[in-house]
Image (tube, rainbow, N blue to C red):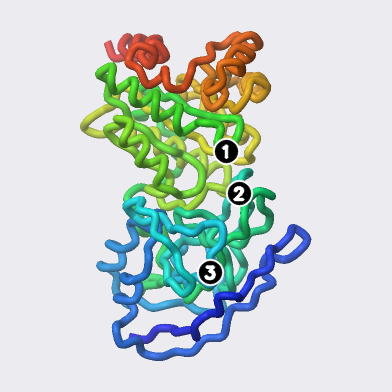
Amino acid sequence: MTILNHEPASETASIPVVRPTDSVQQSVAPSVTRETAPEGLRTRIERAKHAFSTRNIGAFLRRAQGIDLITDDHVPQAGEVILARVTTVGHHKRLESPVSRRQILFPGDEIVVAYGSRYAADQFLAMIPGDLGPVHLAAAGGLASRVLEQHSAVGAATQIEPIGVIRDQHGPVSLARAAAHHPVQDITSRADRPAHHVPVIAVLGTSMNSGKSTVLAQLAHGLAAAGLRVAAGKATGTGAGNDYNLFLDAGAHRVLDFTDFGYSSTFQVGLEEVRDLFLSMADELAGGAERPDVVLLEIADGVYQGETTLLLADEEFGKVVDKVAFSAGDALGAVGGVGALGALGCTPAFVSGVLTSSPLATVEARRALEVPVVPTFDLGTAEVAREMVADLLEGHETDAA
């Protein structure tokens, strides 16, 4: 068994932040030498720190044959899995493990992560590079990408050096190949689907960190406390275990996110593919032997994020989603968001989120809006949560009868 073995990387090595005027393909893949590793490549990969986004890769590799590394003359693709070395620890000082433990990173650590692009207004804009040269750890969940821009309050990204793309006898190993689920192609042609028979609530927000995940979790907890079976999912965003585990802890009996469908990130995924992913996740959560009473789906980032805007405008979204909940950081954002959603035909049933942490902001929003403004943690009570979905449950019970 042969592998690639780099000379130890200098802790002071740096990767210039690439600006939009630069090419993301400037870096040249590092020179390498081949030698036999005493412990073998499989053992080396197993000993590396694995990321949450690659949580299905370990079992996949144990079954795979012909494991080695692609080292040069390769253009990375979204979801491909790499063995990489940490060269400089920056903003992300910890790597989220497959079980969501925060693994502290040290220079020289070898990690297993996946390529993907990231759109995070509060952190990084990062893109998949065109070569196997140095990149950044763009997200703690395990995203290898090249940072183009960053928020001024965020420190420089952690720098990593790809050792190689992991491959087996069938080609590059990817999250999609190891995934338990996959988007159903031509799903819109199917007239009768599970999500048509279960109430589906989509949770949206003004932006990153507006409180979407907390709103969904509180609503899930309240509905579970009311005796309802709740299934929850995160349809778009960047792979991480925080929200996934939050939804489970809140009482959802089943949780999925886009990494379960083979995506490290949904940024720059085409409209039809994002739509098929969303609809497939809704169907998967709504179906099965233990049909839920309610499906809750979070859509990441803000209404103006590219993929989100297109998804909301797609007529198939309205055919599946029965109600929209909206999270905002302040009253003005709530008013603007409700207006923007209304223009897309998705007027929210209620507003919640970070703004409701402030009694004054809550009063302002209630004064300006016609839709209810519900404090986030009130949603965690059975009475309030059930009230939010009472009309949906009645309508679906009537349909079932």
The foreground one among 172 and 194 is 172
Q: Which mark is residue 208?
A: 1
Alpha-carbon distance for marks 3 and 1? 25 Å
Q: Which mark is residue 123?
A: 2
Image: 76 above or below 215: below
Image: 342 above or below 254: above
In the image, what residue occupies the spot 49% across and 59% down?
93
Pointer 2 local density, CA inside 10 Å: few below 14, some 14–19, many at least 20? many
Q: Amino acid at mark 3?
A: Ile
Residue that numbered label 3 is attached to = 160
Circle nearer the N terminus (3, 2) = 2
Q: Which mark is residue 227?
A: none
Alpha-carbon distance for marks 1 and 2? 10 Å
In the image, what residue occupies the spot 45% across and 51% down?
263
Instruction: Indicate the secondary structure of the residue bearing disc 1.
Output: loop
The foreground one among 398 and 52 is 52
Q: Position of residue 312 (x, y in %)?
A: 57, 30
Image: 275 above or below 141: above
Instruction: Indicate the secondary structure of the residue bearing disc 2.
Output: loop
Circle nearer the N terminus (3, 1) = 3
Q: Is residue 176 visible?
A: no
Q: Amino acid at mark 1?
A: Met
Q: Position of residue 197 (x, y in %)?
A: 34, 22
In the image, what residue occupies the spot 52% across and 21% down?
352
Asked if the residue under mark 2 is in contact with the one under mark 1, i.e. CB atoms within 8 Å, the reply is yes
